[in-house]
Image: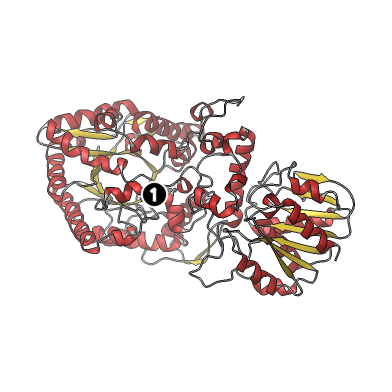
Amino acid sequence: MIVHGVELELLRRGSGRPIVLLHGFQQIEPDARCVELLSRHGEVIAPSHPGFGRSARPKDFESVYDVVNLYAAFLDSLPHEKVTLIGFSFGGWLAAELAVRSCHNIERLILVDTVGIKVSGPDIPDITDVFNTHPDEVKRRTWHDPANAPDFNGMSDEALIMRHRNWESLSLYAWHPYMHNPRLAYWLPRIGVPTQVIWGMSDGIVRPDYGHAVTRLIPGARLVSIPNAGHHPEIEQPEIFVDHVTSFLNR
Amino acid sequence: MDAWWQCEIPYPFVDKSITDAADSVRASLPNRLCDPRIAATLFDEVLDEFLLCDDLGMNVIAIEHHAGINSLIGANPMVTSILARQTRNVRVLSLGTLVSLRPDPVRVAEEYATADILAKGRFDIGFVKSGGTEMASSNMQPVNNEERYWEAIDLIKKALTTHDGPFSWEGKHFSHRHVNIWPRPYQDPHPPMWAATGDPRSSAEVGRRGLRHILVLRGPEGTKRAYDAHRQARVEAGLPKVTTDNFAYAALVYVGDTEEEGIEVGSKLLWFLNTSLKSAPQFNKFLPGAAPPAAAPDLYRTQPRVEAGLTLKDAEKGVAPASRNAEKLISITAPEAMRQGILFAGNPDSVYRQIMEFYDKVGGFGHLALVGRSGYMTHAESSKSIRLFTQEVLPRLRAIAPVEVG
């Protein structure tokens, strides 16, 4: 799919109510269990961010401003009048930025272990610095069960190359200010659609307290926590995750 | 050929058990391990060594590294300004405040213009690309570091050479709308400019810009490759040929009375490689932008993939990451370092011969930078090497006039 001249990799699965997924640090895998489960309840539409997966990243396209504008254009270009927007982690930040600008094509919003705002004092990092922390520690904080972490030894060259490129793109977008927009918390109360916040109870990248803070800032938002899941409840507990999504959509 | 003395002011006095256990001796080691009284003594000694160089006619270099045992000079402009004022004879090179890590290049231009005034024109500006742990220490984005480097150089040069009142700069990385530095530099149009870089792409840019090109501990193959890229880029751009004066090389150097003494004491310099390069994976192989995506399979896998169809090694793909170079250097021994042109050590005749062998291998260079004190080397030992080098080796190097290359 080409949006504003940018070639985006797009995963589509199922039919019915449109559910747009904005991924976190890595693109969404086509064979992910949560995609299959979600696709039983609607049409899953999952683009890879510019510079992630097989999506292009134009020269100098290096900021969340660029990505958010591109996704605004992306939502406009979909045939659906309104979509459910689910943002995971870094993608939650993007989803929240889109929703504070305009909800004209967002019906419902779901933020999953999202980043994007500053909560604590200046000397307390809210979000684990995934760039400056030892990868073993990042892994420990990411997963409830580290056995769910990807096995690099078993991955194809192509998958590893993609992963490294994702990392580069992520650092361009989120290095500074780190994983958040200092002004976003001020604007979150502007979100005017039903919002569900979902959190992995064992998330050590962004702790559940942060989820409470996000929830408090969005009018009417509710928080649900998923046990035995870290930063990726959609991967570690896909059935429970999708149950929460569908009960929110049917509410 | 001219010679330049440098000392990074390393801080080796941390228990080996601590450095062995730490995943990185840069960026993350707590500064409670740095005794400020010892640090003060080290600065005293090394500044005295720089002044000894001034007395004996060897130029001096102030470098910059951040937050680690490898160097206490995180604030290059402070050391640069002391040298600019306290030396009276030799040239002073700042190599350099790390421009791609500084938020405002105009401030850097002010500092450098002031240093040139203090030194009454005996000042050279060096640009170092930085990377690795320093991206964490400085909070600066690593992927577009090189872009910031060139834009900062452009802005600094314009600030140093614009004399008709304020100009405005609104670039990709830097914005400064009212640039008008006082004082302007002593030298006209500006102090000589150096760049420290080794990869072929940026080496070519150094060549096109006509900067003096310095390679640090790269060995003959890497150095020659960089010099060649520099010269080739000039040919392709239709620029005039340059002389060996455009090229410099920095090596670990120690001169003793005897060959045995030179090698024995000179081996202490290897501490810089064996101990102070250690950095954690997030600061090297996984640092965004440090290695191209194509290098990823070898960076991520801890064991080879048996069923992998692609089995190309990094070298075959032309993507050897900087972390690999560091790994090779960490385990290097003195004979190996001497064989690779990283360490020149021995008696004066022998050191001169080693330098000239290297000179021939890389196609000549006009400036030798001596990393002359490191690790546990004492003030007395480094002072002795300074004396022997300036008295016995430097006169012979000075006899080598620049020749046109390219």
Q: Which residue is pictured at 66% across the width and 46% down the height?
A: A51
Q: Secondary structure at mark 1?
A: loop
Q: Is residue A5 above or below residue B248?
A: below
Q: Which residue is more in the foreground, B311 or A220?
A: A220
| Mark 1, residue position | B24
Residue B110 x, y percent position in the rendering:
39, 63
Q: Chain of mark 1?
A: B
The answer to which quarter of the image holds residue B343 is top left
Q: Which residue is pictured at 39% across the width and 37% down the height?
A: B327
Residue A182 x, y percent position in the rendering:
60, 69
Q: Is residue B253 above or below residue A81?
A: above
Q: Is residue B157 visible?
A: no
Quadrant housing the C terminus of chain A = bottom right
Q: Which residue is pictured at 16% across the width and 44% down the height?
A: B386
Name the kind of residue labelled 1 in the image: Ser
Horizontal side of residue A155 vs B108, given as left or right: right
The answer to which quarter of the image holds residue A196 is bottom right
Residue B320 x, y percent position in the rendering:
48, 33
Callout 1 crowding tier (Cα within 10 Å): few <14, some 14–19, many ≥20: many
Quadrant housing the N terminus of chain A = top right
Colour scheme of the picture:
secondary structure
Q: Which residue is more in the foreground, B215 or A10?
A: A10
User: Residue furthest toward the left?
Assistant: B257
Q: Is residue B190 above or below residue B204?
A: below
Q: Is residue A215 visible?
A: yes
Q: Which residue is more in the foreground, A4 or A75?
A: A75
Horizontal side of residue A213 vs B31, given as left or right: right
Q: How many marks?
A: 1
Residue B391 x, y percent position in the rendering:
12, 40
User: Residue furthest toward the front?
Assistant: A228
